[in-house]
Every structure is written in structure tokens, then in C-alpha cells.
Image: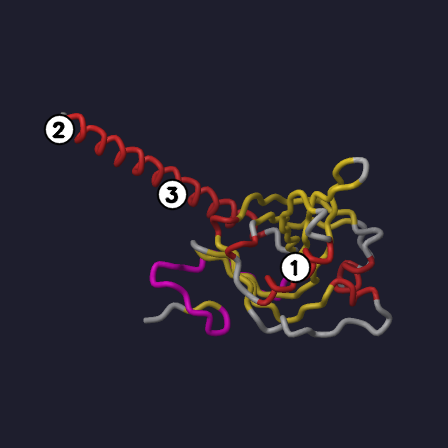
């Protein structure tokens, strides 16, 4: 029997959902980079998109089913947000490429864009978010193309190093994600030990032949 997540998202035979959101969750995609300036380096973060999505965490990947998505610049326009082609698509982040995850207390007193997207925050000064930093190379989905476009706008020649970040308004995800990252780290540790053992055995066989 096939395993399914969300709207007909097929899972691998050895893959299981360990956490999923009950409702659509506000998610902010950002592109961060260290950029060359005439006085040295400067860290800059550019919002890529503000999204409402259902989240599914499996033992292999973190998946976002994006219901509505607004390009960051659109939120500043008087015409209001639109729904680009990314809406209705999936975005996937393999668990092994997640570099860091933590809960952050974000000041949103001057963040009108976030308040405009999430009406429940309109009168709040701060909000707790799950901050996630990951490597984009092995991600999948149309959102990846949007992130690439933003990176080009920053100016590739000026970028010394870059990273990708998410803010997720779902604190319950944190515990499950940290647990999964620990399992992945333990799995990697075991694999390294196996490789070392294999190399040691190979070296021992060579010594016996001499």
C-alpha cells in the first residue's frame, strides 16, 4: 500500500510522517548573504516570500504544501497581495541539509509586511518563531527557483557566502524537528564508524598478505 502525505504526496516505502500541522501555517522564506562592502563584509537578509502552508515532517524530509504565497515586494504595494504560480505546489527540504534550528523571539513592531499577511499579529509587538537554516542545493520545488532569483538580485559577484533561512510560526514543530536531526546525526555517526571499520579490516587483510 502506498504511503501518502497531504494531497497525494507519495512517500518512500521506508518513510513515515512524524509531525504535521493541523492548519495552514505562516512561513517566511529568506535569503541571507555576506556581501562585500568597501569597508569589509556586511550580512544582509532579503525576504523571498511570505506563505501560508501545511507542514509535513517525515523521517527523511520537511515538506511544505504551499496554499498561498506572496512575493515579498508585493506586500509593500497598495494593490495588495496576489497568488503567484508557487501557490498549490510543494517545497521539500531533506532533513540532512538542515544546518540549524531554534526558537527565536522576533520583534515585529516595525514589521508591517508580516502583520499584513498574518492578521492575528496586527496588534502584537513580538512573536515566537521556529528559525531554520538550511542548504538549498538539494531542495525541491518551484520555491527554489524563486530563491535563486533573489540571490541574483543581491549580486553574485558581491556575495562571499550565502545561506537560506525560514521563519515558521509553529512552535510545536521544533521538538519533532530537533529529535529528527539528532537521529540523523546518530545515523551519520554510525555510518562513519562503519566506514572506518571497513577501512581497518581492509588494511588488516593487506597486512596478512605481506
* Contact (Cβ within 8 Å) of mark 1 with mark 3: no
Magenta stretch: residue 178 in it?
no
The residue that label 3 is drawn on is 187
The residue that label 2 is drawn on is 209
Secondary element at tag 1: strand
In whole angstroms, how far apart are the C-alphas of marks 3 and 2?
A: 34 Å
Give the camera-side residue of 57 and 30: 30
The magenta segment: 6-26
User: On the rendered image, what quadrant is the N terminus found in?
Assistant: bottom left
* Contact (Cβ within 8 Å) of mark 2 with mark 1: no
Name which residue lies at 68% across and 73% down: 84
Give the camera-side residue of 79 and 128: 79
Q: Which mark is residue 27?
A: 1
Q: Which mark is residue 101?
A: none
In whole angstroms, how far apart are the C-alphas of marks 1 and 3?
A: 29 Å
Q: Position of residue 70 (x, y in %)?
A: 71, 68
In whole angstroms, how far apart are the C-alphas of marks 2 and 1?
A: 60 Å
Residue 185 sits above or below residue 154 on the image: above
Name which residue lies at 52% across and 62% down: 140
Name which residue lies at 58% across and 45% down: 101
Amino acid at each position: 500500500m502506498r504511503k501518502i502525505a497531504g494531497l497525494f504526496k507519495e512517500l518512500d516505502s521506508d518513510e513515515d510522517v512524524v509531525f504535521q500541522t493541523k492548519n495552514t501555517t505562516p512561513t517566511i522564506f529568506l535569503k541571507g548573504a555576506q556581501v562585500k562592502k568597501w569597508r569589509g563584509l556586511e550580512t544582509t537578509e532579503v525576504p523571498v516570500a511570505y506563505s501560508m502552508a501545511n507542514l509535513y515532517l517525515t523521517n527523511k524530509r520537511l515538506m511544505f504544501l504551499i496554499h498561498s504565497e506572496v512575493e515579498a515586494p508585493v506586500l509593500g504595494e497598495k494593490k495588495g497581495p496576489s497568488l503567484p504560480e508557487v501557490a498549490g505546489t510543494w517545497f521539500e527540504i531533506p532533513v540532512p541539509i538542515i544546518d540549524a534550528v531554534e526558537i527565536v523571539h522576533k520583534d515585529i513592531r516595525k514589521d508591517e509586511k508580516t502583520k499584513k499577511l498574518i492578521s492575528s499579529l496586527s496588534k502584537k509587538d513580538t512573536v515566537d518563531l521556529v528559525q531554520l537554516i538550511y542548504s538549498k542545493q538539494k531542495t525541491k520545488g518551484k520555491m527554489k527557483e524563486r530563491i535563486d532569483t533573489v540571490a541574483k538580485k543581491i549580486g553574485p559577484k558581491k556575495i562571499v557566502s550565502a545561506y537560506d533561512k525560514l521563519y515558521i510560526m509553529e512552535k510545536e514543530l521544533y521538538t519533532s524537528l530537533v529529535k529528527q536531526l539528532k537521529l540523523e546525526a546518530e545515523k551519520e555517526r554510525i555510518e562513519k564508524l562503519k566506514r572506518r571499520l571497513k577501512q581497518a579490516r581492509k588494511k588488516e587483510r593487506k597486512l596478512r598478505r605481506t
